[in-house]
Protein backbone atom coordinates (compact mmCIF):
# COMPACT_ATOMS: atom_id res chain seq x y z
CA UNK A 1 0.00 0.00 0.00
CA UNK A 2 1.44 3.34 -0.98
CA UNK A 3 1.49 6.37 1.28
CA UNK A 4 -1.23 7.94 -0.82
CA UNK A 5 -3.52 4.96 -0.49
CA UNK A 6 -3.00 4.84 3.23
CA UNK A 7 -3.90 8.49 3.54
CA UNK A 8 -7.01 7.88 1.54
CA UNK A 9 -7.96 4.93 3.72
CA UNK A 10 -7.59 7.06 6.84
CA UNK A 11 -9.64 9.81 5.31
CA UNK A 12 -12.39 7.37 4.44
CA UNK A 13 -12.33 5.84 7.91
CA UNK A 14 -13.05 9.22 9.42
CA UNK A 15 -15.98 10.01 7.18
CA UNK A 16 -19.51 9.63 8.38
CA UNK A 17 -21.72 7.26 6.41
CA UNK A 18 -23.40 10.24 4.77
CA UNK A 19 -20.12 11.81 3.78
CA UNK A 20 -18.89 8.50 2.50
CA UNK A 21 -21.95 8.06 0.36
CA UNK A 22 -21.64 11.56 -1.04
CA UNK A 23 -17.95 10.98 -1.74
CA UNK A 24 -18.65 7.72 -3.53
CA UNK A 25 -21.50 9.21 -5.47
CA UNK A 26 -19.31 11.93 -6.93
CA UNK A 27 -16.81 9.39 -8.17
CA UNK A 28 -19.31 6.80 -9.25
CA UNK A 29 -19.21 5.99 -12.94
CA UNK A 30 -22.62 4.41 -12.80
CA UNK A 31 -24.28 7.45 -11.28
CA UNK A 32 -22.81 9.41 -14.17
CA UNK A 33 -24.08 6.86 -16.66
CA UNK A 34 -27.57 7.21 -15.28
CA UNK A 35 -27.47 10.97 -15.31
CA UNK A 36 -26.34 10.77 -18.93
CA UNK A 37 -22.86 12.22 -18.39
CA UNK A 38 -21.25 9.01 -19.60
CA UNK A 39 -22.80 7.27 -22.59
CA UNK A 40 -23.94 3.68 -22.21
CA UNK A 41 -26.24 1.26 -23.94
CA UNK A 42 -29.33 1.42 -21.82
CA UNK A 43 -31.74 -1.44 -22.19
CA UNK A 44 -34.30 -0.44 -19.61
CA UNK A 45 -35.03 2.46 -17.32
CA UNK A 46 -37.76 3.76 -15.08
CA UNK A 47 -37.84 6.23 -12.23
CA UNK A 48 -36.16 3.89 -9.77
CA UNK A 49 -33.79 1.69 -11.75
CA UNK A 50 -31.73 1.59 -14.89
CA UNK A 51 -30.22 -1.31 -16.84
CA UNK A 52 -27.28 -1.08 -19.22
CA UNK A 53 -25.13 -3.50 -21.20
CA UNK A 54 -21.89 -4.43 -19.47
CA UNK A 55 -18.98 -3.28 -21.63
CA UNK A 56 -16.89 -6.19 -20.34
CA UNK A 57 -19.51 -8.88 -20.57
CA UNK A 58 -19.19 -12.41 -19.19
CA UNK A 59 -21.33 -13.42 -22.15
CA UNK A 60 -22.92 -11.59 -25.03
CA UNK A 61 -25.91 -9.68 -23.67
CA UNK A 62 -24.67 -9.30 -20.08
CA UNK A 63 -26.97 -6.74 -18.43
CA UNK A 64 -26.35 -4.63 -15.32
CA UNK A 65 -29.41 -3.54 -13.39
CA UNK A 66 -28.86 -0.71 -10.92
CA UNK A 67 -30.94 1.41 -8.60
CA UNK A 68 -30.75 5.09 -9.52
CA UNK A 69 -30.01 5.94 -5.92
CA UNK A 70 -26.35 5.40 -5.09
CA UNK A 71 -25.83 2.45 -2.73
CA UNK A 72 -22.53 0.66 -2.29
CA UNK A 73 -23.95 -2.64 -1.14
CA UNK A 74 -27.28 -4.35 -0.86
CA UNK A 75 -27.85 -4.14 2.92
CA UNK A 76 -28.11 -0.34 2.56
CA UNK A 77 -31.01 -0.50 0.16
CA UNK A 78 -34.62 -0.07 1.23
CA UNK A 79 -37.05 -2.95 0.94
CA UNK A 80 -39.13 -0.98 -1.49
CA UNK A 81 -36.23 -0.56 -3.91
CA UNK A 82 -35.17 -4.18 -3.49
CA UNK A 83 -38.64 -5.38 -4.33
CA UNK A 84 -38.80 -3.30 -7.46
CA UNK A 85 -35.35 -4.57 -8.42
CA UNK A 86 -36.60 -8.12 -7.92
CA UNK A 87 -39.45 -7.69 -10.36
CA UNK A 88 -37.36 -5.92 -12.97
CA UNK A 89 -34.62 -8.56 -12.63
CA UNK A 90 -37.14 -11.24 -13.44
CA UNK A 91 -38.44 -9.32 -16.44
CA UNK A 92 -34.97 -8.55 -17.75
CA UNK A 93 -33.99 -12.19 -17.37
CA UNK A 94 -37.08 -13.11 -19.34
CA UNK A 95 -36.23 -10.53 -22.00
CA UNK A 96 -32.67 -11.87 -22.24
CA UNK A 97 -33.94 -15.43 -22.68
CA UNK A 98 -36.33 -14.38 -25.39
CA UNK A 99 -34.18 -11.86 -27.22
CA UNK A 100 -30.98 -13.86 -27.30
CA UNK A 101 -32.50 -17.34 -27.22
CA UNK A 102 -30.22 -18.19 -24.32
CA UNK A 103 -30.62 -21.48 -22.53
CA UNK A 104 -30.56 -19.86 -19.13
CA UNK A 105 -29.46 -16.85 -17.11
CA UNK A 106 -27.28 -16.36 -14.10
CA UNK A 107 -28.44 -13.64 -11.77
CA UNK A 108 -25.44 -12.52 -9.82
CA UNK A 109 -24.95 -10.06 -6.98
CA UNK A 110 -21.65 -9.25 -5.34
CA UNK A 111 -21.63 -7.37 -2.06
CA UNK A 112 -18.18 -6.12 -1.17
CA UNK A 113 -14.80 -6.37 -2.83
CA UNK A 114 -14.23 -9.81 -1.25
CA UNK A 115 -17.20 -11.06 -3.24
CA UNK A 116 -15.74 -9.71 -6.47
CA UNK A 117 -17.56 -6.39 -6.54
CA UNK A 118 -15.58 -3.90 -8.58
CA UNK A 119 -17.81 -0.85 -8.79
CA UNK A 120 -19.05 0.93 -5.72
CA UNK A 121 -22.54 1.15 -7.06
CA UNK A 122 -24.77 -1.77 -6.18
CA UNK A 123 -25.87 -3.73 -9.22
CA UNK A 124 -27.46 -6.98 -10.28
CA UNK A 125 -25.79 -8.86 -13.11
CA UNK A 126 -28.08 -10.70 -15.48
CA UNK A 127 -25.91 -12.95 -17.58
CA UNK A 128 -27.17 -15.01 -20.54
CA UNK A 129 -25.93 -18.58 -20.25
CA UNK A 130 -25.27 -21.49 -22.55
CA UNK A 131 -24.19 -24.94 -21.44
CA UNK A 132 -20.37 -25.19 -21.21
CA UNK A 133 -19.82 -21.49 -21.74
CA UNK A 134 -16.96 -21.47 -19.27
CA UNK A 135 -18.78 -19.45 -16.65
CA UNK A 136 -17.62 -20.47 -13.16
CA UNK A 137 -19.87 -22.90 -11.33
CA UNK A 138 -20.64 -22.64 -7.65
CA UNK A 139 -18.23 -25.03 -5.91
CA UNK A 140 -19.55 -27.52 -3.35
CA UNK A 141 -17.76 -28.98 -0.38
CA UNK A 142 -18.63 -31.62 2.14
CA UNK A 143 -19.15 -30.30 5.64
CA UNK A 144 -19.72 -32.13 8.90
CA UNK A 145 -23.25 -32.09 10.29
CA UNK A 146 -22.21 -30.61 13.60
CA UNK A 147 -20.48 -27.70 11.87
CA UNK A 148 -23.57 -27.05 9.80
CA UNK A 149 -25.79 -27.05 12.89
CA UNK A 150 -23.53 -24.66 14.74
CA UNK A 151 -23.60 -22.34 11.77
CA UNK A 152 -27.36 -22.54 11.55
CA UNK A 153 -27.79 -21.47 15.15
CA UNK A 154 -25.55 -18.48 14.66
CA UNK A 155 -27.28 -17.20 11.54
CA UNK A 156 -30.78 -18.01 12.70
CA UNK A 157 -30.28 -15.98 15.85
CA UNK A 158 -29.27 -12.96 13.87
CA UNK A 159 -32.01 -13.16 11.27
CA UNK A 160 -34.65 -13.61 13.95
CA UNK A 161 -33.33 -10.63 15.80
CA UNK A 162 -33.39 -8.57 12.64
CA UNK A 163 -36.88 -9.54 11.62
CA UNK A 164 -38.17 -9.43 15.18
CA UNK A 165 -37.13 -5.83 15.31
CA UNK A 166 -38.80 -5.12 12.04
CA UNK A 167 -42.12 -6.34 13.27
CA UNK A 168 -41.90 -4.35 16.45
CA UNK A 169 -40.70 -1.14 14.94
CA UNK A 170 -43.95 0.62 15.66
CA UNK A 171 -43.37 -0.02 19.36
CA UNK A 172 -40.24 2.07 19.40
CA UNK A 173 -41.96 5.14 20.76
CA UNK A 174 -43.27 3.11 23.65
CA UNK A 175 -39.81 2.61 25.02
CA UNK A 176 -40.58 4.29 28.30
CA UNK A 177 -43.57 2.10 28.88
CA UNK A 178 -41.53 -0.94 28.22
CA UNK A 179 -39.12 0.04 30.93
CA UNK A 180 -41.94 0.10 33.38
CA UNK A 181 -43.25 -3.20 32.20
CA UNK A 182 -39.86 -4.71 32.72
CA UNK A 183 -39.82 -3.70 36.35
CA UNK A 184 -43.09 -5.40 36.96
CA UNK A 185 -42.02 -8.40 35.02
CA UNK A 186 -39.88 -9.56 37.91
CA UNK A 187 -42.88 -10.24 40.02
CA UNK A 188 -45.00 -11.72 37.32
CA UNK A 189 -45.47 -15.36 36.67
CA UNK A 190 -43.55 -15.86 33.47
CA UNK A 191 -45.81 -18.68 32.37
CA UNK A 192 -48.60 -16.35 31.40
CA UNK A 193 -49.00 -15.23 27.84
CA UNK A 194 -48.72 -11.69 29.01
CA UNK A 195 -45.29 -12.33 30.36
CA UNK A 196 -44.28 -13.97 27.21
CA UNK A 197 -45.25 -10.94 25.21
CA UNK A 198 -43.29 -8.79 27.54
CA UNK A 199 -40.39 -11.01 27.07
CA UNK A 200 -40.45 -10.56 23.35
CA UNK A 201 -40.52 -6.84 23.64
CA UNK A 202 -37.50 -6.94 25.86
CA UNK A 203 -35.81 -9.02 23.30
CA UNK A 204 -36.34 -6.24 20.82
CA UNK A 205 -35.34 -3.53 23.12
CA UNK A 206 -32.30 -5.36 24.21
CA UNK A 207 -31.03 -5.27 20.67
CA UNK A 208 -31.74 -1.57 20.36
CA UNK A 209 -29.78 -0.86 23.45
CA UNK A 210 -27.05 -3.06 22.33
CA UNK A 211 -26.72 -1.18 19.10
CA UNK A 212 -27.09 2.27 20.44
CA UNK A 213 -24.89 2.06 23.49
CA UNK A 214 -22.55 -0.79 22.92
CA UNK A 215 -20.01 0.36 25.45
CA UNK A 216 -22.26 1.78 28.04
CA UNK A 217 -21.77 -0.03 31.32
CA UNK A 218 -25.18 0.77 32.64
CA UNK A 219 -26.79 -0.82 29.68
CA UNK A 220 -24.58 -3.82 29.96
CA UNK A 221 -26.05 -4.42 33.37
CA UNK A 222 -29.50 -3.94 31.98
CA UNK A 223 -28.62 -6.43 29.38
CA UNK A 224 -27.58 -9.02 31.97
CA UNK A 225 -30.77 -8.63 33.90
CA UNK A 226 -32.78 -9.15 30.78
CA UNK A 227 -30.84 -12.21 29.88
CA UNK A 228 -31.61 -13.75 33.23
CA UNK A 229 -35.26 -13.10 32.67
CA UNK A 230 -35.03 -14.76 29.34
CA UNK A 231 -33.56 -17.89 30.80
CA UNK A 232 -36.53 -18.19 33.09
CA UNK A 233 -38.94 -17.86 30.23
CA UNK A 234 -40.26 -21.30 29.38
CA UNK A 235 -41.19 -20.84 25.75
CA UNK A 236 -38.68 -21.37 22.99
CA UNK A 237 -40.61 -19.60 20.29
CA UNK A 238 -37.44 -17.87 19.29
CA UNK A 239 -33.99 -19.35 19.51
CA UNK A 240 -32.79 -17.60 22.58
CA UNK A 241 -30.10 -15.06 22.57
CA UNK A 242 -27.62 -15.59 25.24
CA UNK A 243 -25.59 -12.44 25.52
CA UNK A 244 -23.31 -13.20 22.68
CA UNK A 245 -20.77 -10.58 21.78
CA UNK A 246 -22.13 -9.31 18.57
CA UNK A 247 -19.52 -9.10 15.91
CA UNK A 248 -18.17 -5.62 15.61
CA UNK A 249 -18.60 -5.43 11.89
CA UNK A 250 -21.14 -2.75 11.14
CA UNK A 251 -22.47 -2.04 7.69
CA UNK A 252 -20.52 1.15 7.52
CA UNK A 253 -17.35 -0.79 8.16
CA UNK A 254 -18.28 -3.05 5.33
CA UNK A 255 -18.97 -0.12 3.07
CA UNK A 256 -15.57 1.32 3.86
CA UNK A 257 -13.92 -1.86 2.65
CA UNK A 258 -14.25 -0.42 -0.80
CA UNK A 259 -11.13 1.57 -1.22
CA UNK B 1 -44.11 -32.91 -6.23
CA UNK B 2 -42.14 -34.91 -3.74
CA UNK B 3 -39.67 -35.87 -6.44
CA UNK B 4 -38.33 -32.37 -6.02
CA UNK B 5 -35.75 -32.15 -3.29
CA UNK B 6 -36.76 -28.65 -2.28
CA UNK B 7 -40.46 -29.49 -2.14
CA UNK B 8 -39.43 -32.38 0.11
CA UNK B 9 -37.77 -29.93 2.45
CA UNK B 10 -40.85 -27.69 2.42
CA UNK B 11 -43.07 -30.70 3.26
CA UNK B 12 -40.70 -31.80 5.97
CA UNK B 13 -39.94 -35.07 4.19
CA UNK B 14 -36.27 -34.24 4.00
CA UNK B 15 -34.29 -33.00 6.93
CA UNK B 16 -32.76 -29.59 6.67
CA UNK B 17 -30.97 -26.96 8.67
CA UNK B 18 -33.69 -24.38 8.45
CA UNK B 19 -32.80 -20.77 9.03
CA UNK B 20 -35.91 -18.88 8.10
CA UNK B 21 -39.36 -19.43 6.71
CA UNK B 22 -42.57 -17.54 6.09
CA UNK B 23 -45.64 -18.23 3.99
CA UNK B 24 -43.80 -17.71 0.69
CA UNK B 25 -40.19 -18.74 1.08
CA UNK B 26 -37.89 -20.92 3.14
CA UNK B 27 -34.15 -20.67 3.75
CA UNK B 28 -31.90 -23.57 4.73
CA UNK B 29 -28.18 -24.12 4.98
CA UNK B 30 -26.64 -25.74 1.94
CA UNK B 31 -25.51 -29.23 2.91
CA UNK B 32 -22.61 -29.04 0.48
CA UNK B 33 -21.65 -25.42 0.95
CA UNK B 34 -19.17 -23.45 -1.07
CA UNK B 35 -18.08 -22.04 2.28
CA UNK B 36 -19.63 -22.52 5.73
CA UNK B 37 -22.72 -20.37 6.00
CA UNK B 38 -23.84 -20.90 2.41
CA UNK B 39 -27.63 -20.47 2.43
CA UNK B 40 -30.23 -21.70 -0.04
CA UNK B 41 -33.41 -19.67 -0.21
CA UNK B 42 -36.29 -21.03 -2.25
CA UNK B 43 -39.98 -20.59 -2.87
CA UNK B 44 -42.38 -22.82 -0.98
CA UNK B 45 -44.38 -23.37 -4.09
CA UNK B 46 -42.73 -25.24 -6.90
CA UNK B 47 -41.62 -23.01 -9.76
CA UNK B 48 -38.96 -24.38 -12.10
CA UNK B 49 -37.47 -21.06 -13.19
CA UNK B 50 -37.50 -17.42 -12.10
CA UNK B 51 -39.71 -16.29 -14.99
CA UNK B 52 -42.59 -18.30 -13.58
CA UNK B 53 -42.46 -16.87 -10.09
CA UNK B 54 -45.23 -14.30 -9.51
CA UNK B 55 -44.04 -10.73 -9.00
CA UNK B 56 -44.94 -10.54 -5.34
CA UNK B 57 -43.05 -13.72 -4.43
CA UNK B 58 -40.12 -12.76 -6.61
CA UNK B 59 -39.72 -9.39 -4.94
CA UNK B 60 -40.27 -10.88 -1.50
CA UNK B 61 -37.60 -13.47 -2.18
CA UNK B 62 -35.02 -10.83 -3.08
CA UNK B 63 -35.93 -8.78 -0.01
CA UNK B 64 -35.43 -11.86 2.19
CA UNK B 65 -32.19 -12.68 0.37
CA UNK B 66 -31.01 -9.22 1.32
CA UNK B 67 -31.98 -9.77 4.95
CA UNK B 68 -30.19 -13.11 5.02
CA UNK B 69 -27.14 -11.60 3.41
CA UNK B 70 -27.16 -8.84 6.03
CA UNK B 71 -27.59 -11.48 8.73
CA UNK B 72 -24.49 -13.34 7.57
CA UNK B 73 -22.52 -10.11 7.48
CA UNK B 74 -23.45 -9.58 11.10
CA UNK B 75 -23.37 -13.11 12.45
CA UNK B 76 -20.25 -14.57 10.92
CA UNK B 77 -18.39 -11.35 10.19
CA UNK B 78 -17.61 -12.05 6.56
CA UNK B 79 -16.23 -9.38 4.23
CA UNK B 80 -18.81 -9.79 1.52
CA UNK B 81 -21.62 -11.90 0.15
CA UNK B 82 -22.60 -13.27 -3.21
CA UNK B 83 -26.24 -13.74 -4.08
CA UNK B 84 -26.65 -15.97 -7.10
CA UNK B 85 -29.59 -17.43 -8.94
CA UNK B 86 -28.81 -20.15 -11.43
CA UNK B 87 -31.72 -19.96 -13.78
CA UNK B 88 -31.93 -22.96 -16.09
CA UNK B 89 -29.75 -26.04 -16.39
CA UNK B 90 -27.39 -24.22 -18.73
CA UNK B 91 -26.73 -21.81 -15.86
CA UNK B 92 -25.92 -24.72 -13.54
CA UNK B 93 -29.33 -25.10 -11.92
CA UNK B 94 -29.34 -28.65 -10.59
CA UNK B 95 -32.84 -28.83 -9.12
CA UNK B 96 -35.78 -27.53 -11.16
CA UNK B 97 -37.08 -25.40 -8.31
CA UNK B 98 -36.14 -21.73 -8.13
CA UNK B 99 -33.53 -21.08 -5.48
CA UNK B 100 -31.18 -18.31 -4.43
CA UNK B 101 -27.66 -19.00 -3.18
CA UNK B 102 -26.39 -16.65 -0.52
CA UNK B 103 -22.69 -17.20 -0.03
CA UNK B 104 -20.52 -15.53 2.61
CA UNK B 105 -17.21 -14.30 1.19
CA UNK B 106 -13.88 -13.39 2.66
CA UNK B 107 -10.66 -12.07 1.23
CA UNK B 108 -8.48 -15.05 0.31
CA UNK B 109 -11.25 -17.60 0.70
CA UNK B 110 -10.02 -19.25 -2.51
CA UNK B 111 -13.53 -19.28 -3.94
CA UNK B 112 -13.52 -18.31 -7.57
CA UNK B 113 -16.82 -17.06 -8.89
CA UNK B 114 -15.35 -14.47 -11.23
CA UNK B 115 -15.85 -14.76 -14.91
CA UNK B 116 -13.47 -13.98 -17.74
CA UNK B 117 -14.79 -10.90 -19.51
CA UNK B 118 -15.29 -11.17 -23.24
CA UNK B 119 -14.49 -8.40 -25.65
CA UNK B 120 -17.28 -7.62 -28.08
CA UNK B 121 -16.81 -5.36 -31.08
CA UNK B 122 -18.86 -2.18 -31.25
CA UNK B 123 -21.00 -3.69 -33.96
CA UNK B 124 -21.73 -6.74 -31.88
CA UNK B 125 -22.62 -4.55 -28.94
CA UNK B 126 -25.01 -2.56 -31.14
CA UNK B 127 -26.67 -5.71 -32.40
CA UNK B 128 -27.15 -7.22 -28.96
CA UNK B 129 -28.39 -3.86 -27.71
CA UNK B 130 -31.03 -3.73 -30.43
CA UNK B 131 -32.04 -7.34 -29.80
CA UNK B 132 -32.50 -6.70 -26.11
CA UNK B 133 -34.32 -3.42 -26.59
CA UNK B 134 -36.89 -5.15 -28.74
CA UNK B 135 -37.85 -7.21 -25.71
CA UNK B 136 -37.10 -4.92 -22.79
CA UNK B 137 -39.25 -2.11 -24.12
CA UNK B 138 -42.17 -4.43 -23.61
CA UNK B 139 -41.45 -4.58 -19.90
CA UNK B 140 -43.26 -1.32 -19.22
CA UNK B 141 -46.25 -2.54 -21.22
CA UNK B 142 -46.53 -5.92 -19.58
CA UNK B 143 -49.80 -6.34 -17.75
CA UNK B 144 -49.50 -7.16 -14.09
CA UNK B 145 -50.67 -10.69 -13.81
CA UNK B 146 -52.88 -10.52 -10.75
CA UNK B 147 -50.06 -9.22 -8.57
CA UNK B 148 -50.01 -5.81 -7.04
CA UNK B 149 -49.13 -2.74 -9.05
CA UNK B 150 -45.46 -2.04 -8.69
CA UNK B 151 -45.27 1.51 -9.89
CA UNK B 152 -43.99 1.03 -13.41
CA UNK B 153 -43.62 4.52 -14.79
CA UNK B 154 -45.84 5.64 -17.58
CA UNK B 155 -43.62 8.08 -19.42
CA UNK B 156 -41.68 5.10 -20.70
CA UNK B 157 -44.83 4.02 -22.41
CA UNK B 158 -44.94 7.27 -24.28
CA UNK B 159 -41.31 7.05 -25.27
CA UNK B 160 -41.83 3.75 -26.94
CA UNK B 161 -45.35 4.36 -28.08
CA UNK B 162 -44.36 4.66 -31.69
CA UNK B 163 -43.05 1.10 -31.74
CA UNK B 164 -46.29 -0.39 -30.62
CA UNK B 165 -46.99 -1.68 -34.11
CA UNK B 166 -44.50 -4.44 -33.48
CA UNK B 167 -46.48 -5.89 -30.64
CA UNK B 168 -48.38 -8.59 -32.44
CA UNK B 169 -45.20 -9.95 -33.88
CA UNK B 170 -43.64 -10.08 -30.45
CA UNK B 171 -46.61 -11.85 -29.02
CA UNK B 172 -46.49 -14.66 -31.50
CA UNK B 173 -42.80 -15.03 -30.81
CA UNK B 174 -43.50 -15.20 -27.12
CA UNK B 175 -45.77 -18.14 -27.59
CA UNK B 176 -43.37 -19.93 -29.84
CA UNK B 177 -40.51 -19.54 -27.43
CA UNK B 178 -42.52 -20.39 -24.36
CA UNK B 179 -41.43 -24.00 -24.51
CA UNK B 180 -37.76 -23.29 -24.03
CA UNK B 181 -38.48 -22.89 -20.34
CA UNK B 182 -39.47 -26.48 -19.96
CA UNK B 183 -37.31 -28.01 -22.63
CA UNK B 184 -34.12 -27.41 -20.72
CA UNK B 185 -35.56 -28.63 -17.46
CA UNK B 186 -36.75 -31.92 -18.84
CA UNK B 187 -33.17 -32.79 -19.51
CA UNK B 188 -32.60 -33.34 -15.83
CA UNK B 189 -32.11 -37.03 -15.09
Image: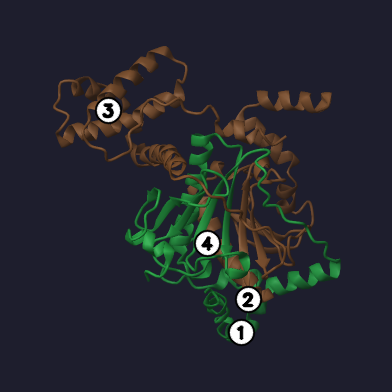
Chain colours: A brown, B green
Give the x, y percent position of residue A22. Answer: 67, 36
Q: Which sits earlier in the primary sequence, circle 4 or circle 3? A: 4
User: At numbered mark 3, what does the secondary structure look like: helix, strand or loop?
Assistant: helix
Residue B148: tell me if it is visible: no
Residue under label 3:
A230
Alpha-carbon neighbours of circle 3 within 10 Å: few (<14), some, or many (≥20)? many
Query: Which residue lies at the image location 59% right of the left edge and 82% below the top edge?
Result: B177
Q: Chain of mark 1?
A: B
User: At numbered mark 2, what does the secondary structure look like: helix, strand or loop?
Assistant: helix
User: At numbered mark 1, what does the secondary structure look like: helix, strand or loop?
Assistant: helix
- Of marks 4 and 3, the one in the foreground: 3
Residue A167: tell me if it is visible: yes
Residue under label 4:
A87
Residue under label 1:
B173
Q: Are marks 4 and 3 in contact (CB under 8 Å)?
A: no
Q: Are marks 1 and 2 in contact (CB under 8 Å)?
A: yes
- Of marks 2 and 4, the one in the foreground: 2
Q: Are marks 1 and 4 in contact (CB under 8 Å)?
A: no
Residue under label 2:
A98
Amino acid sequence: MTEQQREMMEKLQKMSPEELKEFQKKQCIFCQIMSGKIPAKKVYEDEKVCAVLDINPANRGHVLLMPREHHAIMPQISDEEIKHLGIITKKLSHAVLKALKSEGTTIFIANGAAAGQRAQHFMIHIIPREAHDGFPTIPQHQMSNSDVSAMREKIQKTINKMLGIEHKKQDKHNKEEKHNKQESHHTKDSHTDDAHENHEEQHVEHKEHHDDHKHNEKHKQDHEVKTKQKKQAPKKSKPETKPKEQSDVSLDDIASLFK
Amino acid sequence: MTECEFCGIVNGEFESEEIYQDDKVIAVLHLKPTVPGHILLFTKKHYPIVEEVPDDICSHMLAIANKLSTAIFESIACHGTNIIIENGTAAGQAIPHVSVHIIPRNENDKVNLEWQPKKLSNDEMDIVHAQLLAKTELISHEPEHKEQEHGQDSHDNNDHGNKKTGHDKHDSKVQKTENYKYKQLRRIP
